[in-house]
Image: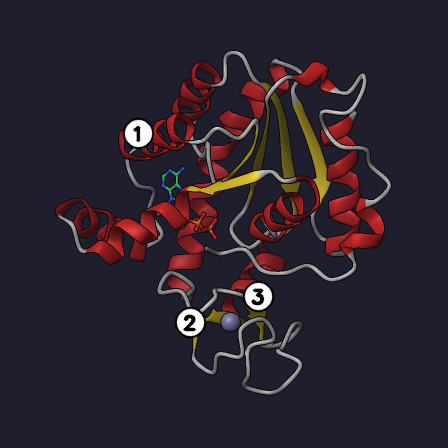
Amino acid sequence: MEYGTLEGIDSVSVVHPPIDGPARLDGSRVAVILLGAPGCGKGTLAFALQRSYGFEPFSTGDALRAEISKGSQLGVQIKALYDNGRLVSDEVVVAMVGEFLQNTDSGRVIFDGFPRTLSQAEKLSGLLADWCARVVCMDVDDDVVASRLLTRYSCKTCSKVYNEKTALPENGGVCDVCGGVDFVRRVDDTDAAILTRLQVYHEKIAPVVDYYSTKGEIYHVDASQSTENVFAVVSDVVFK
Ligand code: ADP
Ligand code: ZN
């Protein structure tokens, strides 16, 4: 899993009632859909929503990394695209999402990194026909996310995400969460792959944003704010 911890969210989260509380969302199943450039903080926010409200996150990036590390034939095909920052086919990721929805009995889910193309968005609407969807677009400048990604690394054991410039472990080379001492960088967090990921993101996400805007379902959040503020704003969107 990719989800790091988020300091200071407990004080914010108590403000909100449980999602299935009285008069809230009529007891519908709720899917939060996070759109945003690589490095905008989707994973951190997903973790916060999981911890505070019990949402179950599904990251297509994590699912693809798991398939790559299995070394399956599909994993080998995915790796060639993934390493260079290209998108994996809609067919593959839609199948992964369909399987996740079939296997979860959670009534609260978060999609992190899906949909990334118009076709994925249209398919997801079909899969979520009887869900209440909350689409959140996390807006942040490319130069901000590129520098975040170039300095990002994570604990090899528990995947807690750190940053060389902004979020070092408290105790030097020891993971705050699990005490691990081995750290890794993502193979696609290189200059060239980051550039490709950002280009692909902007090209493919524009029609997705238009699609949700036309349906009146999208909320824009300034993701250059602190993680606590982003969490507070998104909580309001989810519970509104
Ligand atoms: P990031 O958002 O930081 O690029 P992710 O972990 O979400 O990180 O995705 C990493 C890579 O996995 C992408 O560059 C792409 O190759 C692949 N990927 C993830 N989600 C999708 C998707 N919905 N459709 C196609 N490819 C995807
Ligand atoms: Zn750790």
In the rendered image, the vertical position of residue 6 relative to residue 151, given as above or below: above
Residue 200, located in which quarter of the rendered image? top left
Where does label 2 land, which residue?
A: 156
Q: Nearer the viewer, mark 2 or mark 3?
A: 2
Asked if one can make out residue 107 in the rendered structure from this viewpoint, the answer is: yes
Residue at the extreme left = 73
What residue type is disc 3 on?
A: Ser
Vertical position of residue 5 compared to residue 102: above or below: below
| Residue located at (72% from left, 29% from top) | 19
| Residue 133, image x, y percentages | 60, 22
Residue behind label 1 places its C-beta within 8 angstroms of ligand 1: no
Is there a contact, CB below 8 Å, between mark 2 and mark 1?
no
Q: Is any atom of residue 225 visible in this view?
A: no
Please say which color scheme the image uses.
secondary structure
Q: Is mark 2 within 8 Å of ligand 2?
A: yes
First in sequence, mark 2 or 3: give its number.
Answer: 3
- Secondary structure at badge 1 equals helix
Q: CA distance from mark 2 to mark 3?
A: 21 Å
Report the amino acid beneath label 2: Lys
